[in-house]
Amino acid sequence: MTATAPPPTARRIQGTYYVLVLGNTLAASFIWGVNTLFLLDAGLSNFEAFAANALFTAGMLVFEIPTGVVADTLGRRASYLIGTVTLAVSTAMYWMLWVWHSPFWAWAIVSVLLGLGFTFFSGAVDAWLVDALRAVGYKGSLETVFGRSQIFSGVAMLAGSVLGGVVAQLSNLGVPFLIRVGLLLAMFVVAAMLMRDIGFTPDRSEGPLTATRTVFRASVRYGLGEPAVRWLMLASPFTAGVGIYVFYALQPHLLQLWGDEQAYTIAGLAAALLSGASIVGGLLAPWVRRRFRRRTSTILFATVTSALVLVLFGFVENFWIAIVLVAVWGIASAIDDPVHRAYLNAMIPSKQRATVLSFDSLMGSAGGVVIQPALGRVADISGYAISLLWGGVITAVAVPFVLLSRGAGAPADLATALDEDDAAPEAAIEDERAADG
């Protein structure tokens, strides 16, 4: 007699999703608290360090759509498993570059490969969750699910960033990268055991190039072709692009305010503070969402708050006041994330879900490619505080785009539960095939 797997339930699906988020974030966050210091220790300048980060983002920009198509054609589970291996290998290569004090061109290549690894995750995991929940008849709020995932992510960030800083302090800046490799390989095993595509059947009937063209066209139609989705995506380069820079720039900036640029534990604690803010933001997101009639109102509130806080950084020279600002910025960003994801998922059809979500990540990556080296150059010339101030100004540019998304009047803007969401028709890929004859 062979044992059969227990039937999928909303609780079991959410549990698997939270395990994936927890493990992924723990692996990633082990280097977050020391990444900029790691690059500078390898001999890179501020400009080169943030240029390397920008090339990581460029890798995400280039590969977002192809890997989104992998998730929509080969399956979300397959995309996740490929991503863990790719990221583990490229992280090991990063450590080798640090050991060898390699030239910038080598960092550029491996940074792009790191971006490739992350693109296999972006879109695929959220698409897997939403489709699976729809398949089992989940009637709850997506903000609640994504808010809880934000809490798990925050807990993992808190543990990983603190431990990464402590490990670097007790050993060297390279050891956290090796620990990340081990955690990623462990997550490969976990995902292989727990993750199954539910409510979604991969379509492997077409060749890779034809499938890419078919899914990409439908994704553009239901992404940039839908006004509410388009304007929300066009806000991403300014919010996500600045957010990537701020996360990494806060490490050396807070060390300068502290007065000891070798205090790696302080850098880890700075990342841990953002982790704690992520937990608080995840708890607050569903509550804040209920305070507003529209999802876009919550997004506007978080965007304006983030912009104002970053501008204030330009005038603050006290470490403890800066710590408070870090916490406020982190909470505002964490409140935005679950609502943004719920709003976007509510307007995307299942068969293009991973690709359209990847397209949204692509837009954020496009902003990061330009914004990170630009603000890194500002930091070289005028200091980190001024670069953060300009980050606030750039973030504010997103406000008109969120207002335009609001003005599109999408039903998803008012929805509060998954069964109320007005997703695009599921026949999009078939329509694209018919159009191609």
Image (spheres, grey):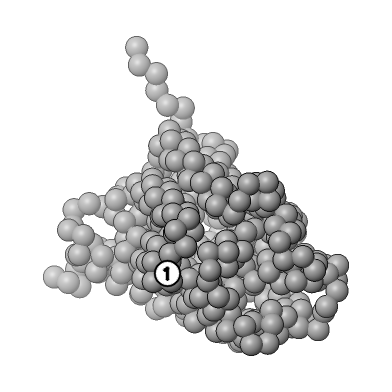
Dot 1 crowding, Cα within 10 Å, few <14, some 14–19, many 20+: few
Residue at horizontal 62 percent and vertical 83 percent from the top: 380
With 347 as the anchor, is 1 left or right in this view? left
Q: Residue at point 17% right, 72% down?
A: 436
Residue drawn 43% across and 64% down? 102
Query: 86 or 69: which is nearer to us?
Result: 86
Total numbered labels: 1
The answer to whether residue 237 is above or below residue 162 is below
The percent coordinates of residue 418 (x first, y second) are: 55, 55
Disc 1 marks a residue whose amino acid type is Pro
Kindly identify which residue carries mark 1: 103
Q: Nearer the viewer, residue 78 or 160?
A: 160
Residue 111 coordinates in the image, percent (x, y)? 43, 65
Q: In the picture, which quadrant includes the N terminus?
A: top left
Task: Please give left or right for residue 144 compared with residue 134 in the image.
Answer: right
Q: Is residue 434 visible?
A: yes
Q: Is residue 6 left or right of residue 407?
A: left
Q: Quadrant of residue 342?
A: bottom right
Image quadrant in which you'd find residue 311: bottom right
Q: Position of residue 261 (x, y in %)?
A: 72, 66
Q: Residue furthest top?
A: 1
Report helix, strand or loop for mark 1.
loop
Q: Which corner quadrant of the image does residue 431 belong to?
A: bottom left
